[in-house]
Amino acid sequence: MKIKVIIPNVGMARSTLDQREAMLKTYARPDTVISVDCIASGPESIEGDYDEVLAAPEIVERAVAAEREGYDAVIIYCSSDPALAAARELVSIPVVGPGEASILTALALGHRLSIITVLEETIPGNVGRYYRLGLPEWRLASVRSLGIPVSRLRDDLEQTYAALLATGRRCRDEDGAHVIVLACLGMAGLGARLQKELGIPVVDPAFVSVAWAEELGAIGLVHSRISYPKPADKVRVSLCRSEPTKPGPREGGESEAAQR
Amino acid sequence: MKIKVIIPNVGMARSTLDQREAMLKTYARPDTVISVDCIASGPESIEGDYDEVLAAPEIVERAVAAEREGYDAVIIYCSSDPALAAARELVSIPVVGPGEASILTALALGHRLSIITVLEETIPGNVGRYYRLGLPEWRLASVRSLGIPVSRLRDDLEQTYAALLATGRRCRDEDGAHVIVLACLGMAGLGARLQKELGIPVVDPAFVSVAWAEELGAIGLVHSRISYPKPADKVRVSLCRSEPTKPGPREGGESEAAQR
Amino acid sequence: MKIKVIIPNVGMARSTLDQREAMLKTYARPDTVISVDCIASGPESIEGDYDEVLAAPEIVERAVAAEREGYDAVIIYCSSDPALAAARELVSIPVVGPGEASILTALALGHRLSIITVLEETIPGNVGRYYRLGLPEWRLASVRSLGIPVSRLRDDLEQTYAALLATGRRCRDEDGAHVIVLACLGMAGLGARLQKELGIPVVDPAFVSVAWAEELGAIGLVHSRISYPKPADKVRVSLCRSEPTKPGPREGGESEAAQR
Amino acid sequence: MKIKVIIPNVGMARSTLDQREAMLKTYARPDTVISVDCIASGPESIEGDYDEVLAAPEIVERAVAAEREGYDAVIIYCSSDPALAAARELVSIPVVGPGEASILTALALGHRLSIITVLEETIPGNVGRYYRLGLPEWRLASVRSLGIPVSRLRDDLEQTYAALLATGRRCRDEDGAHVIVLACLGMAGLGARLQKELGIPVVDPAFVSVAWAEELGAIGLVHSRISYPKPADKVRVSLCRSEPTKPGPREGGESEAAQR
Amino acid sequence: MKIKVIIPNVGMARSTLDQREAMLKTYARPDTVISVDCIASGPESIEGDYDEVLAAPEIVERAVAAEREGYDAVIIYCSSDPALAAARELVSIPVVGPGEASILTALALGHRLSIITVLEETIPGNVGRYYRLGLPEWRLASVRSLGIPVSRLRDDLEQTYAALLATGRRCRDEDGAHVIVLACLGMAGLGARLQKELGIPVVDPAFVSVAWAEELGAIGLVHSRISYPKPADKVRVSLCRSEPTKPGPREGGESEAAQR
Amino acid sequence: MKIKVIIPNVGMARSTLDQREAMLKTYARPDTVISVDCIASGPESIEGDYDEVLAAPEIVERAVAAEREGYDAVIIYCSSDPALAAARELVSIPVVGPGEASILTALALGHRLSIITVLEETIPGNVGRYYRLGLPEWRLASVRSLGIPVSRLRDDLEQTYAALLATGRRCRDEDGAHVIVLACLGMAGLGARLQKELGIPVVDPAFVSVAWAEELGAIGLVHSRISYPKPADKVRVSLCRSEPTKPGPREGGESEAAQR
């Protein structure tokens, strides 16, 4: 199975993307191919609705390109699930939103979950995304933040882990969390250690997303066209010039639907 | 008071925009100035998440420009409220979403409301927007569609009205609606006649939005910065070239926040 | 437009009522006429269900009289919205409940609101009114009280403001409120100053109610007759002798529906 | 145990009230004393909020009198539960609301209930009362009406029963009700026959209310003072002249709290 | 009326069971017969789902036997309501679950309730049972535990009462409870004293269950067969050899439905 | 990875169990080992709460044995998820409930789902299980039944498929389902064909359960001990003599926790 991972941030080096690919293969099926790309037009990180607006156009282009190139599933590598619905409208392969997949997985692990996000400013967005799923307040113990912006999370992983551990303890001891959900892909890889030290399950969105992509792809489950209808053909003016989406071996060009 | 109305569609003639301005002044305060613009980059109409993604970047630019030009409030002229949260993050004047304002107004008029949208494909999005507000199922009688795309709504207003009347009757008689909400700005101006014929309140999003903009602007109520935090300063690459947002007498240029 | 404001308290001097009229005109449209009356039979203030029961019969009489005298809208000047549904049953002009209008307005300003009421004893009633609208727990940060009875709120406005500020800070900092709703008309006029000092929106029920009355009256939106059916003609014995509701130039007599 | 039953209607003959007493004793404990009164000031029946407003002042007076006269519990004999909260504020003996007690009992009998009310116009009020308890939509199968006003229900009991049977069948077969709640005391006594013919439980509010009054009275359970705080002492002008509430052997006078 | 009380614990002496019978008669109707039994196969106390699984087969056998022996109602004497639905499927007399009956009663006494359970480990189960009824978060103030296992609750009643009082105060003062529900039958008999000292209603599950059994039995209300369908006849292999359920004067044998 | 599948029915031939093993391997990872067993003491199928009560004791014994024998995950092969919580209390490897896993997966595929169960009598149980997860009514389009008991589902797969197709069409066309969930493992293997013909996703519980077991096992996610606490050591009398659970190479003996 071939999975395309779209990181909705600009300015990541190819070597960094390769490291992500290696990490994501940790628990994947032996025959799973994972290809990680970032976008060329958008913010350096997603930390709010404005960032999502800027990243979204290229995310959907990339998802369309991935399907055309034969990928079996797409992961939008951000717990905010930016452009998730729009991408699903455009393609007919599974599109995994790590935020959605992590929360749904957590619901099978315990009665009440806490979500850990990066900044105090990103708490309201996480609260909103939880309730948009239709989930009840009694299963959400809390949403807490680390106080570290996305772009700094991986500067010093020990420091990030220390903040995660302190925050996770407050979720468990003060808020009554039974399960922890890490709500930023920048925290990827720290879940297993945190789970061991906290003694309660910690959902690491990176690995859960790969597992969901594999599961849906293997079984042949794709989002419903009634929920995510194919956009009708009509005039759509795109003045964006996102060079990397020009037709080519890997990234492809603008989708047909996006052209006039 | 000066209100900027942003229509998130491309390709509308200035004369059409002027007609909208005239219509929106019908119930406005005598001293209210209403300025209507459409966008240059995006879809010809908003009928799904992909359309919203394409329109959103210029909507937020326009909102920023409106604030800089001294407008007191902004209306994003679409019941889907595209880019509403992102625009609120960027500006400190009220940003009215007609979908949100219409539903909240309807809640004060009756116990159960029906929403009338354009297409069967846009029903799920309307259902989702209603629940995202946190509202309960028992106050939503139904969401029904006319079967007419946005771009055709004003081709033959009598025919559109006939569809509205037939649909409104089903909402009232089969679904138990106490109040009707028109969920497309293309239906603007047809509410009063429909209300008279159905005998129950019909919320016309165009006029309600102007009233909310006036109310919030007059009283000095603006969205909360905790709900809509100001985006942090960071790298944001925008490859969009939306000419109309270049600095100028009316539309202004890219917001500072949107530049690198 | 002519708006009748009914204060459901007894014993207010005409000069005090005139001051309220002046205050309410602050943000009103230039051509709006506001007429403020209090009731002659009922409690000195509304601080519970028993108080509402005593005030309700005259409130509905006054609403009926206002309609007969040509008013375009009625405001029941109390955040408990006493007799709101009954008044709507009897008249065909908009009847604004400040509690309802304030909360619906607050929902468009931020994700989570706190309600500030007068006494610890009035907290449960405010909680109940919020949930009766069908709103979800996650959008209600808290309900807090000042510890000042209604009749004392305006004795020393500085002291009342100090209590409001202290309480509002706890709502924002301890309860996570994004927006504050003042839930007593005795707090009218203190919202703007509080909003400035707290840095989050504060909904002042007095001004919001006038704006809603203006909006609904201007656009022609009246409550649904399905939600608020016209009472059938039948025997209704009223042994109340509320002199001010006898027919006359301003207050009018008992409504026909209320007579035998 | 002595139970006072307050019928919130005017104009009932003493002989009719005595019949109600006899009927209510059917399933009561042998030593239970049931005393039934109607009010002198109010509507001939409760069929909306305006009717409740007119009946409420005397209901609370009667409840206060009952406590003073040594009754152990009060039943407000109407499924709308008019003045229930106000009466609880004033007295320290259990006050049973037949609407509330019937629905709570029904929840222990089956997963989904239907409510049968008198008129189409009283459906919205019943829907509202259900949701005010905080109950979920999935447990409410439907609210249906007989099309017979309260004052006619007992004119021809066979005809009323026939309407109940037809309506109950639709609740069971079309709406998926597992349990039926009769939502008008005028239907009292018809539940057992209906239950037998429908084959699902039918909650008859009259008998359930007596049982709740007995249960609460026997065990010593009274409503919480935090939910229903004792009204503070203050000016309350009552211009009502409801002769029957003057002090006397059975009806008592105005409560102290209600006097100036 | 004859009520069978099934205690789902093993190893209780007949003298202890007789004491329970005596206690349960405190508030019962004079003519009510109460017969208390415990089970022979299962755990010594119910403190989790595994305990319920072990106790359930004999609980349902006992309920079937009780009906065959002419009992008018059954009480499953545990606030976890183990095997409640299964027992209802098998018998056509009322089966009272003390947890369900207590919470429904509490809802008529105040707006918000707190539940007191035995152990921290039993809190999640109590939270779950509350929400399974479909009740809303805003009516649940908290679930707290005493830190005393079921088997120790009655070793030193003064110590248990002291823990209840301390916990009840926290529910009232820190969590905002208006009503307390005792969620273990081992706390039976301590409610009245606690209620007096806390000043808010305390629902004692033992007495409330007897009252519900009497009420349902007297009025003739039994659970709905649509909610609790009679099990179809089919192969059911039971390798359990629970001697006490062999046919006999009091306990009866395996139900027919349970045989092959 | 080694997965133990426990079918909670009695009387299945080893050859039938082997066929299930073969079917379940269809989409599994190449290195996954799947071992399928049925129980020796319980009903021939799970179609209600009584059936669950009878099957539960051996299900938990089997789960304990599986862990002891080195299995990495357990699947309780029934959409009712019988004994799911109890099994999780006892073991520290993932225990997958097909009902829970199917619904959570469906939530990521579309906005509204319909559940197809076997009998009209099993509809209420399925409704209850959905709401117990805390999910909202608006995401549940309907629960419909085939009218075929579990034991007959695989007698004539074509006839079962025809019933599924007819029922699925009604879910999609009359109830507005966007996704279908098959709620009986007896329907396993028919999902893909149904999905193709209906044009909307169909969640087949068998394959989804294997995928969840693989995912949780691979990533190292196990249920939370706070939600599912380890049962305390205490007296538990088990009079069941379920021979197959005696210690042995494959099934193992009674768990220690289950012994006295």
Image: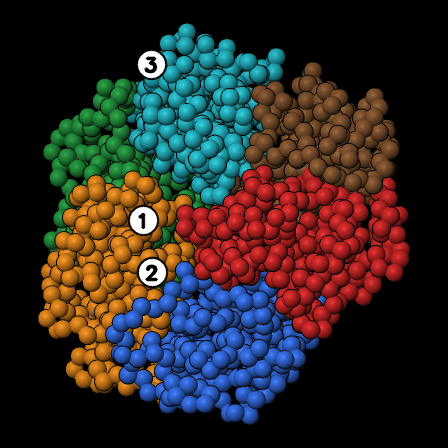
Chain colours: A red, B brown, C cyan, D green, E orange, F blue
Q: Same subunit under labels 2 and 3?
A: no
Check contact, mark 2 vs mark 3: CB within 8 A: no
- Residue D21 % position (x, y): 20, 48
Q: Is residue C37 left or right of residue E199?
A: right
Q: Amino acid at mark 3?
A: Gly
Q: Between residues A185 and B116, which one lies in front from this camera angle?
A: A185
- Residue B120 % position (x, y): 71, 53
In three-dimensional space, the C-alpha distance between marks 2 and 3, rounded to whole angstroms, equals 55 Å
In three-dimensional space, the C-alpha distance between marks 2 and 1, rounded to whole angstroms, equals 14 Å
Look at 41% across and 47% down and name the residue there: A174
- Residue C26 % position (x, y): 55, 13
Q: Amino acid at mark 1?
A: Ser
Q: Amino acid at mark 2?
A: Thr
In three-dimensional space, the C-alpha distance between marks 3 and 1, rounded to whole angstroms, equals 41 Å
| Label 1 chain ID | E
Q: Residue C8 sits in which quadrant?
A: top left
Q: Could one spot residue C131 in this view of the protein?
A: yes
Q: Is residue A56 left or right of residue B216?
A: right
> What SS does tag 1 mark?
strand
Q: Is residue F49 left or right of residue D15?
A: right
The residue pinned by badge 3 equals C11
Q: Nearer the viewer, mark 2 or mark 3?
A: 2
Q: Is residue E54 left or right of residue F157?
A: left
The residue pinned by badge 1 equals E114
Label 3 crowding class (10 Å Cα cut-off): few <14, some 14-19, many 20+? some
Look at 37% across and 88% down and name the residue there: F246
Look at 34% across and 28% down and name the residue there: C119
A147 lies above or below C66: below
The residue pinned by badge 2 equals E122
D185 lies above or below F52: above
Q: Between residues C170 and B214, which one lies in front from this camera angle?
A: C170
